[in-house]
């Protein structure tokens, strides 16, 4: 797809500027190499705060030699047109028109935006994510000297000394040949402390099994004393707290939007899973390490948070029948694998996650929240960010039924019901 083709498809034919004048997307896209999408809302104080620092960065960058190659577009979640208009009025960049609610939602889902403000940079030719944490770019590279901020190999970003709790220092080259868990965490964060306790046991079990595995803490603590106290509980390595630049580059590399986050890498430094937290909690015996992603997940308390990441196909089954859940996974798996492979070939996130849900309190709560009937089996697609659901009401769920349901959803042929 040409640059103008991607930008046109993603943003539509017209954008608006601060005066609400229309700007032709085709003409704009011909000069771009990088597109920044700023996801936010006028009601959010952090979003308003970001506008000031982003405006300074944007004005400086547009005067540089690379200035014409970058454009930023505001993608709003505002519901009130007057509030949106007042917010956009102070922006030197462009915005998706307020009326383009469907297009906005597609972008939020496509790029799995879960927090605001969020600023991501995309290759304007392909739509691939170049940098998922643009907030750190404008903080760490205020002059834009590192443009276009593309991802670097883990071995390059991590390069330098690492610490052990004993105070011993060793070079990051010691990680070569290991599976590596990059652990973004902080002592002030209660979920982080809870995960750390479990992770210490998981680390011990994996090491005792003979696997070559190491964890590197990337601290988000607010002081060196707090970091030292927290790190003293850990048997693995850490980036020195004083090396703020390296810690920030690692956050940028993996687009960290919240903690705790555990990224698991293979010995070549490529990402196996970004859901290390979920995997550790779901697999306390570490039998499935290094936790290659499964096409179909069994819905649990620990992975239910993924329902908020974008549209999810959920097949509800009667789990009182022991074989029902496994049969449901086998039913969905070929379709899930096909969708995942299609998008992996384009270096894209899949547009759907796939779950099987049995009968438990968490599933009951999900049914109640989404106002679903008690029927089982029940085939659904839930889109929490759009507060929309799609329900397939058929007597028998077959592979053909699932395939058609998914294809029609992706082609936007299904009519949503409100959640």
Image: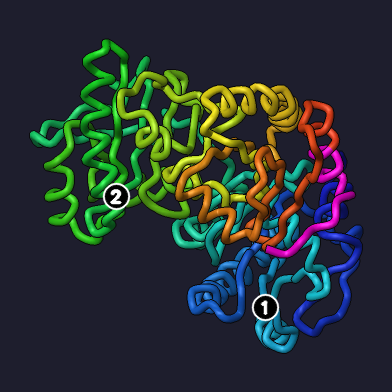
Place of residue 109 in the rendered image (x, y in percent of width and height, measured from the top left): 68, 53
Instruction: Report the residue at 86% width, 42% height from top.
Output: 408
For the C terminus, the quadrant is bottom right
N-terminal label among 2 and 1: 1
Q: Residue at x 12, y 42 (%)?
A: 232
Residue 361 versus residue 264: which sits nearer the camera?
A: 361
User: Quadrant location of residue 345?
Assistant: top right
x then y, percent, for residue 4: 87, 50
Q: What is the residue that sits farthest to the left in this orientation?
A: 166
| Secondary structure at numbered mark 2 | helix
Q: Which residue is identified by label 2?
A: 192
Q: Are marks 2 and 1 in contact (CB under 8 Å)?
A: no
Residue under label 1, please give it: 91
In this rendering, does residue 65 appear at all? no
Q: Is residue 210 left or right of residue 229?
A: right
Residue 409 shown in magenta: yes
Position of residue 96 measured from the top left corner of the image (x, y, whole percent): 78, 69
Task: Between residue 133 and residue 263, name the one nearer to us.
Answer: 263
> The magenta stretch spans which residues?
405-419
């Amino acid at each position: 797809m040409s640059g103008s083709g991607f930008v046109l498809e993603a943003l539509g034919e017209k954008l608006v500027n601060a005066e609400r004048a229309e700007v032709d997307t085709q003409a704009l896209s011909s000069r771009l190499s990088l597109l920044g999408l700023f996801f936010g809302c006028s009601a959010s104080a952090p979003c308003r705060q970001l506008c000031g620092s982003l405006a300074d960065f944007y004005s400086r960058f547009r005067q540089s030699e690379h200035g014409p190659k970058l454009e930023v577009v505001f993608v709003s979640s505002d519901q009130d047109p007057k509030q949106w208009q007042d917010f956009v009025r102070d922006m030197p960049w462009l915005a998706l028109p307020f009326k383009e609610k469907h297009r906005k939602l597609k972008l939020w889902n496509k790029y799995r935006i879960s927090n605001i403000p969020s600023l991501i940079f995309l290759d304007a030719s392909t739509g691939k994510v170049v940098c998922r944490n643009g907030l750190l770019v404008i903080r760490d590279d205020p002059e834009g000297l590192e443009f276009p901020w593309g991802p670097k190999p883990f071995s390059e970003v991590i390069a330098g000394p690492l610490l052990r709790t004993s105070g011993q220092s060793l070079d990051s080259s010691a990680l070569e040949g290991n599976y590596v868990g990059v652990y973004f965490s902080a002592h002030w964060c209660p979920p982080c402390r809870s995960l750390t306790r479990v992770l210490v046991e998981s680390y011990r079990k994996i090491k005792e099994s003979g696997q070559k595995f190491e964890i590197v803490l990337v601290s988000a603590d607010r002081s060196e004393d707090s970091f030292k106290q927290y790190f003293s509980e850990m048997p693995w390595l850490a980036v020195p707290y004083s090396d703020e630049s390296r810690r920030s580059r690692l956050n940028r590399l993996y687009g960290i939007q919240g903690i705790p986050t555990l990224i698991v890498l293979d010995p070549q430094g490529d990402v196996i899973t970004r859901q290390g937290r979920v995997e550790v909690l779901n697999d306390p015996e570490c039998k499935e390490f290094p936790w290659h992603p499964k096409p179909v997940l069994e819905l649990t308390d620990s992975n239910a948070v993924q329902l908020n990441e974008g549209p999810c196909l959920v097949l509800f089954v009667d789990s009182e029948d022991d074989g029902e859940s496994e049969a449901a996974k086998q039913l969905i798996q070929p379709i899930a694998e096909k969708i995942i492979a299609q998008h992996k070939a384009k270096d894209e996130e899949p547009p759907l996650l796939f779950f099987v849900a049995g009968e438990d309190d968490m599933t009951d709560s999900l049914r109640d929240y989404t106002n679903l009937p008690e029927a089982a089996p029940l085939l659904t697609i839930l889109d929490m960010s759009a507060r929309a659901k799609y329900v397939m009401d058929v007597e028998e769920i077959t592979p053909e039924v699932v395939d058609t349901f998914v294809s029609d959803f992706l082609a936007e042929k299904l009519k949503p019901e409100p959640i």
